[in-house]
Amino acid sequence: MKRSIFIVLFAALTMGLSAQDEVVRYFFSPNGNGDEDGSSWENAAAGEYLGATLADAEPGTEFYLMEGAYAPDINTNRWFIPQGVLVKGGYPESMTGTNTKYAYAKGGQSIFSADLDGDGKGDNTSYAFVYIGEGSPTEQSNAYYKDWLKTEVWGITFRDGARINSKYWGNMVFVQAAQADFHFCRFLNNNSTTTDDSNGSNGGLEIWGSSVRCFDCIFRDNITAKGSGAAFQVRARKSNSGATDPADYSIAYFERCEFRNNIAFSTLTSTQNDEKWGTYGGNCSVADNGGTVYIINSLIADSKCWYRGCGIRVSTNVTAYFICNTFYNNPCRSRGDRSTNNGAAVSAGDNSKTYYAGNIMVEYAANDDFTGSDAEVYIQNASAVVQSAGYNIFGTVTNNSTQPGGFLANDNIPTSLATVNTIESIFGSNTIANQGGVSDVIAPLGTAPVAMDLAAVKDAVAAWPIDEMAKVMDLDKDQRRYTRAANSVAGSYDPNGVAPDDEEPIDAVENVYTTVSRQGVYSLLGNYMGESLSNLPAGVYVVNGKKVIK
């Protein structure tokens, strides 16, 4: 049985630690290098030890991975990523010494695939392949995400997850009662195949009572059966859709991401001659009382579901912010006994709050229905709140809200079938492709979009109740990380944007939380030990978010 290298290397890697900020670092490659003691790139430990070593890691430990495929912990055949660690993958073989600076925008990927036997099918079967959180992935945690240190994951591809049972325990990556940031990661081909008609599991990323942020990530070709949220699903703490305490709610933040071909899929019935798509958000779903979701400078394209928000379902008492996104071809079409589609791009439920600024939300002309709940954006009833900062381009909108706010005169909402904005009118024959950034995007026609006053949008958004996410939101960049022009355009692609210097290496941990770090003294297991080290025995502690040796 393979084991962790943690015990073997701990003494060597912690020798000479100061009492404040020294960090334990491990270097890995798929096959190992040199002495394989994990002390440098030339002596990278073999990938077969990564899973168990990672599972045993203390808060503050850092892991650096060369690009290539890695197997999970052989004891569980799954990955456990503890809270408070840093995992950065995708480094090339040319890395030397202990250098960790790397231009991620041009980087490779380290692969965590659930296809363990190489037959093209995922093998995690019962539970999520990757778990980040407190307690067990099969139990509902009593913890709160604000009580834990943040985990960071860079340059990892999570793929080929395959679950066959029901419940909402996630398929590929399950984050529960935790803080987690994902940078330049990919969630690909994760497929939930439950046969339980009463319940389902999402495809790529499941979030329970957590704060999760994704930057420059790709969600592509994920499928969920009998459920919702093929790319991601957001739920409250303990998966409680009836939660009323804001402390139970999740925060899900996505900036410069690509969501493409994510499908909520069900099975055929004897009366149907085509596929029956699953319910509630083919691409993204936020459950009742799930919390708050932010989607910024992102592409949501080619999703499919049965009804209620193929691009995203914003359910009861949920808040959602949509800023400078492109929603492209997300056909939400009824099947079976359903008579309404309830919004293709966005469906907003009872007492929801949705905010819009500088988005494009259109379908092909043949798919767009103009009236009632078949509209591209559907605000479900009078209790829902809508607030716009303007400069949106909508296919069709049905707004049943009677609350203050609403859409603006420059939101370009069609008033008749003759004026409906469509993919043909906004994008012409252009197709989704790489336009110089990390992920794929589509370029609008030069004459089609309305001009967008970037400063005006930023001023309006600044007045919204965005809380701590305002500190990380970067509206100056489009999806490609190109700097937007002052006179920009709606959507996630600015044709006048200025390319970044992709050769600039990224070393520092970006966008660190400043308001939710634990204060005081904690054990490495997360137990509160008081406000001072003075009365504690010798050992390793976490003091105000930093590891300290007494």
Image: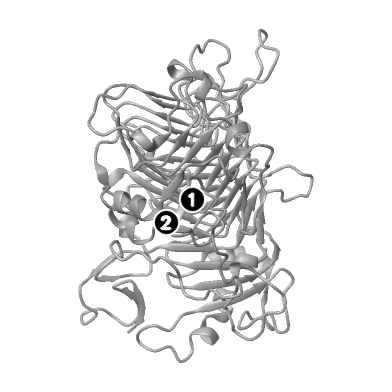
Q: Which residue occupies 47% across, 36% down? A: 393
Quadrant for the N terminus, please.
bottom right
- SS for dot 2: loop
Element marked by disc 1: loop
Residue at which label 1 appears: 297
Work out whether residue 376 can be spotted. Answer: yes
What residue is disc 2 on? 475
Neighbour tally class for label 2: few under 14, some 14-19, many 20 plus, Cα within 10 Å: many
Image point (69%, 17%), residue name? 274
Residue most toward the right?
A: 119
Residue 229: image x %, image y %? 51, 36
Q: Can residue 240 be seen?
A: no
Above or below for 76 versus 284: below
Residue at the spot 36% in from the left edge and 50% down from the top edge? 457
Residue 350's tag is: none
Task: Look at the numbered discs 1 and 2 and tell me whether their residues touch, using CB distance below 8 Å.
Answer: yes
Amino acid bearing label 2: Leu
Q: Is residue 409 above or below residue 4?
A: above
Quarter of the image containing the C terminus?
Answer: bottom left
Q: Residue furthest bottom?
A: 16
**Where does residue 391 sit, x and y in percent of width and height?**
41, 42
